[in-house]
Image: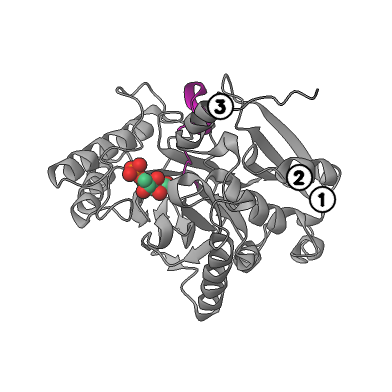
Amino acid sequence: MKVTLSVIKADTGSVGGHNRPSDAMLAKAKEQLAGVISSGLLIDGKVTFTGDDIALLMAHTKGVDHPDIHKFAWDTFLETTKVAKSQGLYGAGQDLLKDAFSGNIRGMGPGSAEIEFEERPSEPFIVFAGDKCGPGVFNYPIFEAFANPYHNAGLLLAPEMIAGFTFTIMDVNNTEADRVISLKVPQDYYDLCILLRDPNHFVIEMVVENATGLQAAVASTSRLHNIAGKYVGKDDPVAIVRSQKQFPSTGEILSPWALAHLTLGDNRGSHHVAVMPVKQNSIISFFDGPTIMSAAGYCVHEGKLTESVDLFDQPFWDLIRTKAAQKTLDIRAQGFYGPAMAGMDELEYTGVIQNLKRLNEKFTVRKHE
Ligand code: F6R
Ligand code: MG
Ligand code: MG
């Protein structure tokens, strides 16, 4: 059967700062989800959290961008916001940037990644959910899994994968409209590298397998980054990646995260830190970070979801977590200097820019006699 997986995620308030949603908020989201499973809007669903964001994973047959699904997610986040307000939580409704729902949740604050496909006899997939980062965090690991045979020799071994994949990349700095480009590997390999090297500007939105035409991965890439010409902060992205058989294996998709690559996010969305792969339902702590990424593996069958396997909850990743913490401490030791912090166009707070304007007026140009 044809199934749609929708993951919609938002920060609607947190306990103790920007750290995690409350149990009451999670209970409300679960109650809402149970309601639409019994009404038949969804076949199945799950509620998880990563840092201060609640993620709704929804399995249904309505297709992507369906107004009823998006409205359900929006209404659920309004409900969790109400709970957050009633408990006096911090940042209640933080990611709900518009007053009224207008048919599609994209561009309204929450992140959404959706994929529709004909179920394979066994349909394994991974839901990645990040906090304190932008969607560019996926550029490196998705490129490694779907384009780099040095990292993933499976690309050379599986007959369907040898013809490569097509990447859709979005220019997230273009505020007027979705500006996208499609590049195929192996043909456009270097062109793809030219774009992906700038993960705050050019971001992977989708990956399709060339031999089969099947969608393999989608990410919650959006122009939220610069909504209405104003920088509104990092999007705290999600991605859905199908695995096994004609796609990279679950392990091949996970292994690039062992680099604990540096990304932009963390405290005030304005620092470069190493991404820490974490267990489900992990919180935010050191320096309002570090940037975290969780990975939940599922199978879906006739729209029913299995329990999840917590893919970063394995002793191997303890070493990577230590490495990520060490890399973050190393760059944090550099304070505000140079590459430790974001460039001017990525700073989430306006303090530096305002102070520069003030200082600018005090500069004098020295005249040589
Ligand atoms: C980053 C984040 C936090 C806040 C920081 C200041 O995404 O959520 O690092 O930017 O805690 O928050 P405010 O300005 O709300 O006090
Ligand atoms: Mg927050
Ligand atoms: Mg968040």
Callout 2, which amino acid?
Asn
Q: Is mark 2 within 8 Å of ligand 3?
A: no
Vertical placement of 172 versus 263: above or below? above
Q: CA distance from mark 1 to mark 2?
A: 6 Å
Which residue has dot 3 on it?
A: 362
Which residue has dot 1 on it?
A: 163
Label 3: few (<14), some or many (≥20) within 10 Å?
few
State yes or no: discs 1 and 2 in contact (Cβ < 8 Å): yes
Label 2: few (<14), some or many (≥20) within 10 Å?
some
**N-term-proximal mark, 1 vs 3:** 1
Which residue has dot 2 on it?
A: 210
Report the magenta residues as a range: 224-237
State yes or no: discs 1 and 3 in contact (Cβ < 8 Å): no
**N-term-proximal mark, 1 vs 2:** 1
Frontmost residue, 56 versus 235:
235
Camera-nearest label, 1 or 3 = 3
Q: CA distance from mark 3 to mark 2?
A: 58 Å
Q: Quadrant of residue 88?
A: top left
Q: What residue is shown at x 52% (from left), y 41% (from top)?
A: 220
Q: Quadrant of residue 274?
A: bottom right
The secondary structure type at the circle numbered 2 is loop
Q: CA distance from mark 1 to mark 3?
A: 60 Å
The secondary structure type at the circle numbered 3 is loop
**N-term-proximal mark, 3 vs 2:** 2
What residue occupies the far left of the structure in this picture? 86
Callout 3, which amino acid?
Lys
* Left or right of 91 on screen, residue 9: right
Q: Is mark 3 within 8 Å of ligand 1?
A: no
State yes or no: residue 14 in magenta: no
